[in-house]
Amino acid sequence: MTSCYVENDSVASISLSELSSSSSVSDRACVHWGCVLSGSENTAVFQAENDLLENQFFIKTICLSEEAGDEMHIVSVCDGVGASKPLPIASLRHCMPMISFPGLELIPPVTFKLCSGKGPVFISAQHITLNPIEMTEGEEDEDEDVFISSEMKLTEDFKRDTHPNKVNLAGREYVGEHGHTTWLPLVRKIKQQIATDPTLFPEYPPILGIPEFTQRATELALGKDSPAIVESRVFGIQTVGSTGAVRLGAELLRSWYCSSSSWSGPILLSSPCDDSLTGTFKAAGIEDVQHYRYWDAESNDVCVENMVHDLENAPERCVVVLFASGHHPTGAELSQEDWKRVAEVMMKRQLFPFFLMSAQGLCSGSLEQDAWAVRHCVSLGLELLCAQSFSYSFGLYGERVGHLLCVLKQNMLAVQSQAEKLVQTLWSCPPMEGARVVATILSNPAHLVEWQESVKGIAEHCMLIRERLRERLRLLGGPGRWDHITKPGGLYCCFGLNAQQVEFLIKRKHIYLLPHGCLNVSAINSRNLDYVAEAIHQAMHSQL
Amino acid sequence: MSIFGEVPQAAPVAVFKLSADFREDQHPNKVNLGVGAYRTDECQPWVLPVVRKVEKMIADDHSLNHEYLPILGLPEFRSSASKIALGEDSPAIKDNRVGAVQCLGGTGALKIGAEFLRRWYNGTDNTKTPIYVSAPTWENHNAVFSNAGFEDIRPYKYWDAGKRGLDLTGFLGDLESAPDHSIFVLHACAHNPTGTDPTQDQWKQIADVMKRKNLFAFFDSAYQGFASGNLEKDAWAIRYFVSQGFELFCAQSFSKNFGLYNERVGNLTVVAKDQDNLNRVLSQMEKIVRITWSNPPSQGARLVAITLNTPELFAEWKDNVKTMADRVLLMRAQLKEKLKALGTPGTWEHITEQIGMFSFTGLNPKQVEYMIKEKHIYLMASGRINMCGLTSKNIDYVAESIHEAVTTVQ
């Protein structure tokens, strides 16, 4: 027999530590719920009528009636998530007839069972309904907002969230086990050297950056003995981070691609892709942005067949944005065989590759391997652009060290001169500090070795977290393959979650992640691994 | 066949070409009066002592992290930089209607301001709004606004070559005839390249017309402190406009007054009618920054913020700035004296009347060519010289060369 005690309590009179304090929840109603279990009716079920997102269910107390016998009474519960086997949560006798729960949340439908004893046993709980979360209006519109706002909004929401267990898995930086960005002791040492170097003078740097930096960055990407370098068919531009490199590359294409004075596309980006990438191309005047299929939700991996198909059917001579390694936001990678196929199609259809390589060395631990795709295209004689970032591999996020690599067949000086003109309309010349640090490290054999070791360390750390996460999820018993977690390397990983599942994780579990369930694995550490794994498990297996 | 096979060679930027030619010149008496950076009396770039100090502090501070700065930049930099422009006790700041965006130097600040205006000013996406830049002006002004999408960039009368001074009548005339809501790029002080600024009275007249015609004031402030040696004096025009109730932008550069040319430290100060408007403007600027350079660089901003926010360092910095300004003033005075002593034809009062790094000598292109080719003294074809290139060792040679150029070349 179940009975429902309905009261209209205001939320203010209830202290529930589990309640979300997100300001986006507009209003709540709280209702008490109770049931009585006995020998004759030893099961009771609480069902939420509506969608999961609108309901929260908290067990408050389980209490043995005075009239009950002297035997041990055991109450077990199972909820809407996972384990079909009920879990004992209370064992009561007259000497200890009551147990209170400070705020144990269960996901409906919740089934209580009296496993032992004849009762009666009283159970009381609270059922809180939340009104559907409203989308906050932006002040201006709509198209521009959509593709730029999601990452920025997530960051803002995370900052405002006061929940003790909140986790931000949507960030761009690599964080160490302690939860902060790390950096090399070597970097600090070099910065100190720079700060006290009497020979360094403050002057406007060259518009395209310092040659010591651009040379090293070029060699890093292509390998010192690359045919393009040997044949002087490549130049590099120091930029303000990889965003600056992408923006500059986009401006260059807009102004000069295909002898056009105002080329506006089409440009093909992967699906999914970083929401600001679309914005950057559009801001440069490249309006026609299309997508090729990359991530496949069925297989939780890249689907090369789809990708190749889309490239085969792309307009000839369009520009294709490719991630050499470390795809953002999914982390999914192409094998070398896959790349060979892709490069073949690119050549056949005269598609222009614009590579993004933000974390060379961090994905596989090997600088060469992570740059293989770029080097392969160069060896085939393709012209290409490549936007590199040194934020991750040097921990120099704040210094904005980026590089735009340009591999051409001819006319290099003219293109260089036009690039100079474009740089002057963006930032005039780039900031020196970070580039100096990178150039110093890459030019010194001993520093270079130390740096490579640290990069490998980051790659290995990410791999370790991936394995632990996979293990956790496997133990939680959900069905499913977890290869997509450990197959790729680097920072990002994608779970292929739907919008509701992602919203559940953000709003209910205070775990912030990107659309499709893409997340930054480095933000998972020994302190939050269990919480995150359980939450993901819940999201994937409850009735949403 | 390259996809970029038909890209034409761009003309080199004049001032950089000048420096390149100077570097290649082997003549023992060569002088570089072209580039816009400060030089000591030994003709060396100068690391401000306060900058050296703070750089070391930053490098030794183990608590600093290297994370991305917020998209709009380092908060303590933004607010202290805006205070420098508007004054600590600015009523606009007290009213919470002043905000800022940390940018990549003055250029970056102009860029973000221009991109915002193109999208949201005078309707939405109104690329036809006229942009007025002074005749002459810093050559990059044109390129920044044009690349931001503005289609109509026009000159406003400014320099009167005949009287070697401000053409106020022409300036006011162009203000009157400008379409309402046009955008005017104003040099806050130390006009580049002429070194000629409106007087306070003249600024009042300019502001009057601009108010009446709803013209937008976009200040370019690259030399605050550097021009007169006094921060308040060099910011008078901006502060006057704010006191008159203008909403305005001010692109600030800390390259010259901090000697931080290579760390790209700039600030776009935004003065709005009220806080609500300010917040909406900043939110849109944030989106623009995100797809331009994402986050600004931390080194220079930290340095400036620490300096401006620490009283002893702030005092030391003002002192360093005065040192630079004073040397420039000294060179101006001496050059004028020497030309007068030589009896060089023409008037040379403008050399000391003009202010800041640059002086429009009044030399014509032929005379400039003579200076470069025959005397190995490098200056811009416009006759602009950088006073910082003058030293106690070369000032006689330069004065004599100017004398020769003026007397022998027509």
Image: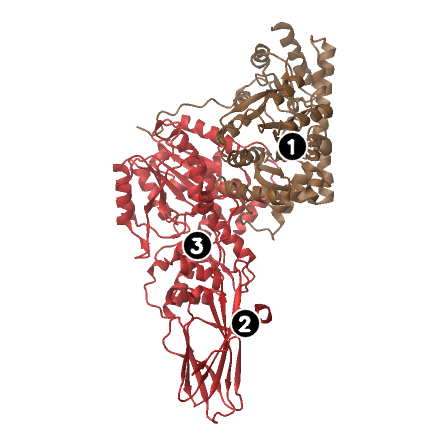
Chain colours: A red, B brown
Residue B287, image x, y percentages:
51, 43
Q: Residues within 10 Å of mark 3 (few under 14, many from 20)?
A: many
- Give the secondary structure at mark 3: loop
Q: Foreground residue, A500 or B211? A: B211
Q: What distance separates the C-alpha of mark 2 from that of mark 1? A: 73 Å
Chain for mark 1?
A: B
At horizontal 43% and vertical 90% (from top left) the residue drawn is: A118
Instruction: State the mark number for residue A514.
Output: 3
Residue corresponding to mark 2: A8
In the picture, measured across the screen, residue B301 lies left or right of residue A262, that is right
Chain for mark 2?
A: A
Eye-nearest disc, 2 or 3: 2
**What's the amino acid at mark 1?**
Trp
Up-down: is B220 above or below A134? above
Residue A290, image x, y percentages:
35, 42
At horizontal 62% and vertical 49% (from top left) the residue drawn is: B60
- Give the secondary structure at mark 2: loop
Residue A431, image x, y percentages:
54, 38
